[in-house]
Image (cartoon, grey):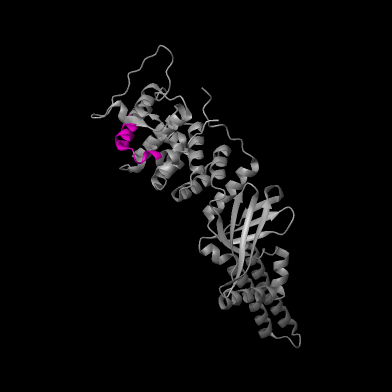
Amino acid sequence: MSYAPVPAEVVSALKDHPHLEAIVRFVRRTAMDAAEHRRATFASRTPEGRVEAPPALPEGLTNSDFNTAFGNVAELVGKGVTTATEALLIGVLLALSLREEAPSEDEELTLVAHMAWLAAHTPCDALLAFDAAVGERAGLWRAVARIAVEPVEVAPDFGRTEALLAAATLGSALAPASAPPRTRALAQVDDPAVRALLALGGLAREPLLGELLPTPFSPVTTVVLALTLVLGALQLARLVARLAFGYRRPASFTLTERGLELTHRTELLGRVLKEQTLLVPLANLASVTREVQYPRAGLYAGLAALVIGTYFGMGLFVDALRVPGGSSSLMAMAVALIVGGLALDFVLSSGIDTMRGRCHLLVEPRKGRTICVGAIDPLQADAMLASITAVASGASVPSLLPPPA
């Protein structure tokens, strides 16, 4: 089996070519002309008997100036490629032309759209080399994400093929600049195959950061603990431990092919007491839920209203009967403690995160205890949920490789 280079190796091999800039401009000029006129014969071997005029070489350069370790670029553009390495060479050179930023995002989108069309209909796949050639261009990745999410809005003749290619490009990118557009695209796209490509590419590289929290109490348990004043005392103890002793449990969730991996540690007074990693296989995953804003607010409000209403109603009743030994001040204190405990539990368990624009993620396995991670960015949580759905559903992703010649 012959060795085929990867885009990064081609980029590295070309960097010292004496005429690299001129060759890049030559490939871009001819490729963009083909894309604008939708000529699918670009860099392709033409049928027997059909003759096309070779593209004009830049002034001052000869055919030999286009020689590289992977083939003669002028001949490959003029006569067509025959191997995957030759096709990769043309794609890398076209991708290198994007190192110079476009004057506007609209022009950037147009250039990337032309390259997506070429990747879909010709052997020239510059998308494959974006990460290696121009990885840190944020505008570039936004354009790719736009094609993945709404291809028809980018070009009238675009469809699912271009969206899949863009998703594969964005999903496999390692550049940090590609992460935010990939996260936004995951939260917006509906096509399961496009979501699968976006999700599978970023699985192990984008952990979901937050803090491990106690599993929320059920409504019945919350009522019982509130009425017995245990709820307020428990949350007050947690608050003291956090503020006075620096008690923290930072955690990170990572979605891999094995399932959801939770890594967390326990910190006290700035020292790590324990570090642990848990794995929840997808087969053992019952549900993953992102809590809405102010979860269980209705329960807390209803319970507080019940306590206050009961106090005043029973107080009037007791006053009417004038039972000896009754003390309204003690009853008022009890009500204040119960309502205060509810308020403290609500604020510490969910209110602070919501006010900070954060949310909770609840992971419930079929076997084992429920895991709650708080202080999570909602957009990243939505992307994680989309990734889990895409992976768990086993979305069928069509092959993106061209048919054999």
Say which quadrant the N terminus sits in: top right
Comparing 402 with 199, the one in front is 402
State whether residue 274 is above or below residue 26.
below
Left-right relation of 283 to 189: right
Quadrant position of residue 21: top left
Q: Residue furthest left?
A: 60
Left-right relation of 24 to 253: left
Residue 354 placement (x, y as % from top left) = 54, 62
Quadrant position of residue 395: top right
* Residue found at x 68% / y 70%: 306
State whether residue 45 is above or below residue 295.
above
Residue 164 placement (x, y as % from top left) = 51, 35
Residue 193 placement (x, y as % from top left) = 57, 37
Q: Is residue 22 magenta?
A: yes
Residue 268 placement (x, y as % from top left) = 59, 74
* Residue found at x 70% / y 86%: 327
Quadrant position of residue 329: bottom right
Comparing 153 with 21, the one in front is 21
Q: Is residue 183 visible?
A: yes
Q: Is residue 146 visible?
A: no
Q: Which residues are magenta?
A: 13-29
